Image: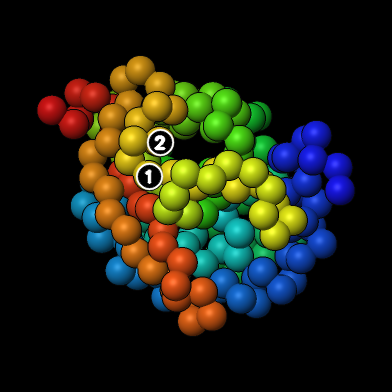
Amino acid sequence: MNTSNPENLTAQYYETHSASFIAETAALDLSTLYPRFLQQVPDHGYILDAGCGSGRDSKAFKDMGYQVLAVDSCPAFVQQTQHFANVPTQQLKFEDFAFEACFDGIWANASLLHLPPEPLQRVLAQLHRALKPTGCIYASFKAGNFSGIRQGRWFTDLDRSGLQRLLPSGLEVFDHWQTPDRRPQRAYEMWFNVLLCPAAKSI
């Protein structure tokens, strides 16, 4: 296995397994994760679904009256989200983000975790730039401190202290909590959920 480029390895995994991933995740009920994030987003605000996957969350936000832009690097996920959620959807890698202060909220559910620490740090800075000063980022990671290849993909597992070391200047932890995996066969796995906000908002 070629592990010299973790992002390419992960992209190849999802291109190969996109159908099974969509089938496994599209109907998951993550509604209990939404309220803490949406409390920080104005009604009808503009949300970026960063790493939209099956389009499940994009559809949920749209159905609740939010404006949504969905992005993913996997062509099959882009097509799925366009069809399932019926929101504007772009094929885009995290490192190619060039948004500037335009989103009220950024939702990155189980997506940033596939970046190694150094690229993750750069992408967090890019997401910060894409956020309005009053905005908020939600992200989720496998809970722990592992970094490496697992199950054919790169994973960066994090806790509060591990994430703190990666945060760019001006972006702070607003809230964090842990939840079990919603998939019955993985209920033993824990997720680290975090809200990140510009420092001025966190005061």
Q: Quadrant of residue 91?
A: top right
Q: Residue at x 54, y 80 (%)?
A: 185
Q: Is residue 89 above or below residue 180?
A: above
Mark 1 element type: loop
List the residue tagged with mark 2: 162
Residue 165 x, y percent position in the rendering: 40, 27
Q: Which mark is residue 81?
A: none
Residue furthest out toward the bottom = 184
Q: Is residue 9 above or below residue 85?
A: above
List the residue tagged with mark 1: 159
Q: Amino acid at mark 1?
A: Asp
Q: Amino acid at mark 2?
A: Gly
| Residues at marks 2 and 1 touching, judged by CB atoms closer than 8 Å | yes
Q: Residue at x 47, y 62 (%)?
A: 57
Residue 28 x, y percent position in the rendering: 48, 75
Q: Is residue 135 above or below residue 113?
A: above
Mark 2 element type: helix
